[in-house]
Amino acid sequence: MEHLTGKDKIGRQWVIQEAIQGVLSILDTKGYKYIAPKDGSKLVSWGVNIETGFTLEPQLYHLKEDPQEIKNIAETHPDIVNNLKTRLDSIKR
């Protein structure tokens, strides 16, 4: 709880986000965001042209350089993908 109230001066090393249909992502303090692969529709069924972001490939974005999550850099940074995927899998267990 101290992380959320600002009483912990160190803070968390990562944050978990949950999106539509339970898709999880993990963000680290360096600005990297890993999104787990998900098979599904490319557009939400209840909206007009709203992308789900679902893809069978892992996604990795460096939010400090790409806050709009446009350039997936997972292929060029497999070590970061593996590290964040391992952390996320561990948390889910």
Image (cartoon, rainbow, N blue to C red):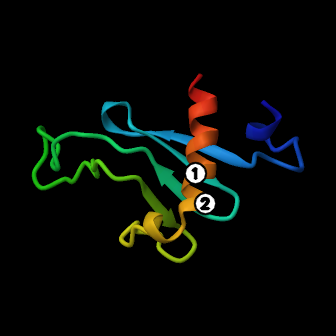
Judge by depth and name the residue closer to the eye, 89 or 31. 89
* Residue in view at x 54 percent, y 55 percent: 81
Judged from the image, the secondary structure of the residue bearing numbered disc 2 is: helix
Contact (Cβ within 8 Å) of mark 1 with mark 2: yes
Place residue 89 in its image quadrant: top right
Q: Position of residue 35 (x, y in %)?
A: 44, 49
Place residue 75 in its image quadrant: bottom left
* Residue in view at x 38 percent, y 72 percent: 71
Residue type (three-letter) at the residue carrying disc 2: Asp
Judge by depth and name the residue closer to the eye, 41 or 80. 80
- Quadrant (top left, top right, bottom left, bottom right) of the N terminus: top right
User: How dense is the environment of label 1, judged by Cα within 10 Å: few (below 14), some, or many (20 and up)?
Assistant: some
Q: Position of residue 52 (x, y in %)?
A: 25, 48
Q: Where is 81 relative to 6, above or below? A: below
Q: Which residue is mark 2?
A: 79
Q: Which mark is residue 21?
A: none
Q: Which residue is mark 1?
A: 82
Residue type (three-letter) at the residue carrying disc 1: Asn
Judged from the image, the secondary structure of the residue bearing numbered disc 1 is: helix
Judge by depth and name the residue closer to the eye, 18 or 59. 59
